[in-house]
Every structure is written in structure tokens, then in C-alpha cells.
Image (cartoon, rainbow, N blue to C red):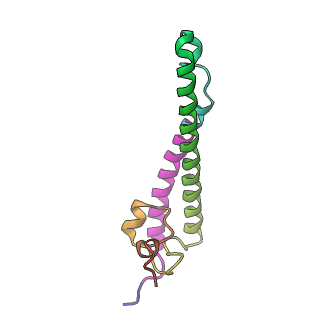
Amino acid sequence: MAEKTRYSDEELEEFKKIILEKLDQAMKDYELLKSAITQSGSNDTQDTSPTFKVLEEGAATLSKEEAGRLAQRQLKFIQHLQAALVRIENKTYGICRETGKLIPKERLMAVPHATLSIEAKQGGAK
């Protein structure tokens, strides 16, 4: 039997559903991180005594920087998921961009935006 060169439309639809669910959750997480960065109302340093103000401002700045980094990573993840949806529409989803072979279904279930097979990612692709 010939080796499969692409996933069937039914399989692509299954992957699309998984990606849309992950994308929905990723967007919610991103919005949460964005609001953590821009929030200036509650639990700010305005309601504390001056001695703790400097420490809290430092911690708040650190938290916002960390939230900013997390938001950047989340945005990148969202972009990867959106690109995966485009590959599904083009029917090129699940094909390793280095080897041209199908990425195993198990890998795509775990990392739905993967564009490389494990072999290619580890540098063993020929």
C-alpha cells in the first residue's frame, strides 16, 4: 500500500476542531494577560503605606514585565495556530516542511501547530 501523502478531509476537520478550541483558549489567556498589564485600578500601591510603596511598585513592575513576556509568547502561539488553520484550508496541514512526509497524528494531537516531524526537529532528517 502506498504511503499517505496527506491527511483526509475528515482528519483535517478533526484537527481543525482541536486547533479552534486551542485558539479560543489562547485568545482568552492573551486577553487576561493584556488586562493584567494595563490594569491600574485595584490592588495598586495607592492603598498602602509609603514604606511598602517602593517595594510594591518594584514587584508590580516585575509582574507587568513578566506578563508582557507571557503575552508575547501567547501572541506567537496564536499566530502559529492561525497559520495551522491556513495549512488545513490548503490541505498541506501535517506535512513536514523539511522531509515532505506526514507528521505522525500523535505529534499533531500534542502540538497541533507543528510543521516539523520529530526526526526533522532533532536534525536527523535526510
- Secondary structure that dominates the magenta span: helix
Specify the segment rendered in magenta.
4-32
Side of 21 relative to 54 (left or right):
left
The quadrant where residue 31 appears: top right
Could you say which is closer to the camera, residue 23 or residue 126?
126
Above or below, 32 against 96 in this view is: above
Whether the magenta-drawn stretch holds residue 37 is answered as: no
Placement of 58 over or under 117, stated as above or below: above
Residue furthest to the bottom: 1
Q: Can residue 36 be seen by looking at this rendering?
A: no
The N terminus appears in which quarter of the rendering?
A: bottom left
**Residue 122 left/right relative to 31:** left
Q: Nearer the viewer, residue 58 or 92?
A: 58
Question: On the image, which quarter does residue 14 sit in?
Answer: bottom left
Residue 27 x %, y %: 55, 45
Q: Is residue 123 visible?
A: yes
The x and y percentages for residue 73 are 55, 49
Q: Where's residue 56, x and y in %?
A: 53, 21
Any magenta on residue 11?
yes
